Amino acid sequence: MEFKIKTDDPAALASRCLVAGVFDAKKPELTPSGARLDRASKNRLRAALERSGMRGALGETEMLCDLPGIKAERVLLVGLGAARDFHAAAARRAAGEAAALLNKRGIRSADFCLLDAAYAGKNARDATSARRRARHLVEACADALYRFDQTKSGAKRPAKLARISLLCGRDQQTEAARGAREGAAVARGVALARDLANLPGNICTPSYLAKQAKQLARRHALKSRILNEADMKRLGMGALLSVSRGSREPAKLIVLEYHGGKRGAPPVALVGKGLTFDAGGISLKPAAAMDEMKYDMCGGASVLGALQAAAELRLKLNIVGLVPSSENLPDGAANKPGDIVTSMSGTTIEILNTDAEGRLILCDALTYAERYKPAAVVDIATLTGACAIALGDQASGLFSDNDALAAELLAAGEASGDRAWRMPVWSEYDRQLRSPFADIANIGGRYAGAVTAACFLRRFTEKFDWAHLDVAGTAWASGAKKGATGRPVGLLVEFLLGRA
């Protein structure tokens, strides 16, 4: 997909299709560029709106052809919803619906006149709003055109819509171009994360994921290291290694380093859970929807996607990506409820539920992160169904005992449209993790499962600023549109842009 910025007069542009917005009101309200097209066509757009009954409801579309006074072959009107509610999510929905329709119609190039649709409320005061809007539109179009067909027989079917231009005023050109460039990098990072997560567990094993990480490193001049089980044993990673004992696939710890900042400057560390398949181990999961447990590596995939985007954007920042990767399967050698393992930090852990394995592989990776003396550490994991129950698929759960870091991530979520919601990690919850036989138990009982999981991880983060993103509700969709979403790559890249 190719994205460009143009400053042409839309009425004079020889386009295959112009896309203009309509706000929902008692009388549908065209955006400034839409109003310009209406004047050039002697009010044909408004006449068409009246005939069709289109009100401008979010995602509503109306295609017009051969309008007088306009050089474009077609004009696609897309509903933006009410102006007072127009923000990133609405802009993404509108752009995505338009891109999907154009692709379905076989239109290979289009020009979007949507950057003059200003966001409402606090977002309208954003000094870089042209940049934000351009980024959101690019990401939304790429998302709408994403296809996963790697595991289907026959020829691949790339999107027919191959070129999109965003029209803007000359005073917005620099910021819009910057936003489009960022959006394209994020979109490619999201696509990488989705591709890896959508692969089945018999293809995307820990070894496969490690191979893809090494290829990513070669493409983008990253430093890579893959720790095997012998390496991890020497380091004392008993918690991580215990999870892979029930699998024939060896565990891997993927380490990627991006050096874009000053030499010796503390890096930001991203730690992503990489369970390429999670059957629950001896604490076996129910059979229904177990196929979706290939998505238990979405946290790790998002780290690879974010690092790719950071490298493409040449961010002036040092970043470390750590992806502990394993399978969690039942076997005679697998963890058993009641087993006690010793983590890299020396902390002993009683395993009361073998399906709470993500925190076991993450805790050793977090301890490993200490050697980098990081400026901040963010771990990303499809950690608990409890978080999905609490927040659904709208927001990722954010846990941190550092207010400044939490505020950064929340702001990054709002700016990117990939939102998070802060949850508590109060010390009062620690009592639920007490064990009579070990330093800590790996589960905290029925209540506040997402919180106690975060409190477990916090035990291994005392030497750096830390935040945890539970993406169990946001990393993939179920049902008819089953598939990985690529979240929270957008949030992570916005966070890294802010740090850079």
Image: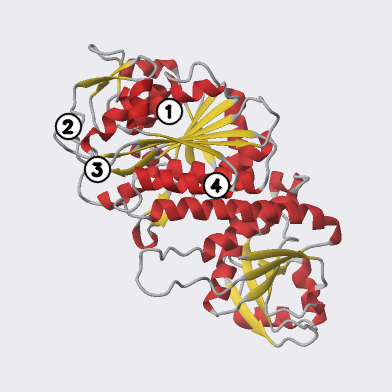
Quarter where residue 117 is shown? bottom right
Q: Are marks 1 and 4 in contact (CB under 8 Å)?
A: no
For the residues marked 3 and 1, what is the alpha-carbon distance in whole angstroms?
Answer: 21 Å
Query: What type is the residue that disc 3 sits on?
Result: Ala
Query: What type is the residue that disc 1 sits on?
Result: Ala
Which tag, 1 or 4, sits closer to the chain's start? Answer: 4
Query: What type is the residue that disc 4 sits on?
Result: Arg
Which tag, 2 or 3, sits closer to the chain's start? Answer: 3
| Left/right of residue 445 with respect to residue 132 in the rendered view | left
| Left/right of residue 23 with respect to residue 399 in the rendered view | right
Q: Is residue 225 above or below residue 102?
A: above
Q: Residues within 10 Å of mark 3 (few under 14, many from 20)?
A: many
Please name which of the two marks, 2 or 3, marks the residue nearer to the observer: 2
Residue shown at the point (78%, 82%) measured from the top left: 70
Disc 4: which residue: 218
For the residues marked 2 and 1, what is the alpha-carbon distance in whole angstroms?
Answer: 23 Å
Q: Are marks 2 and 1 in contact (CB under 8 Å)?
A: no
Disc 2: which residue: 333
Disc 3: which residue: 279
For the residues marked 2 and 4, what is the alpha-carbon distance in whole angstroms?
Answer: 36 Å
Nearest the viewer among 496 and 112 is 496
Which tag, 2 or 1, sits closer to the chain's start? Answer: 2
In percent of width and height, residue 132 lies at 69, 50
Residue shown at the point (69%, 33%) measured from the top left: 261
| Left/right of residue 362 with respect to residue 98 in the rendered view | left
Disc 1: which residue: 365
Which tag, 4 or 3, sits closer to the chain's start? Answer: 4
**Helix, strand or loop under label 1:** helix
Which tag, 2 or 4, sits closer to the chain's start? Answer: 4
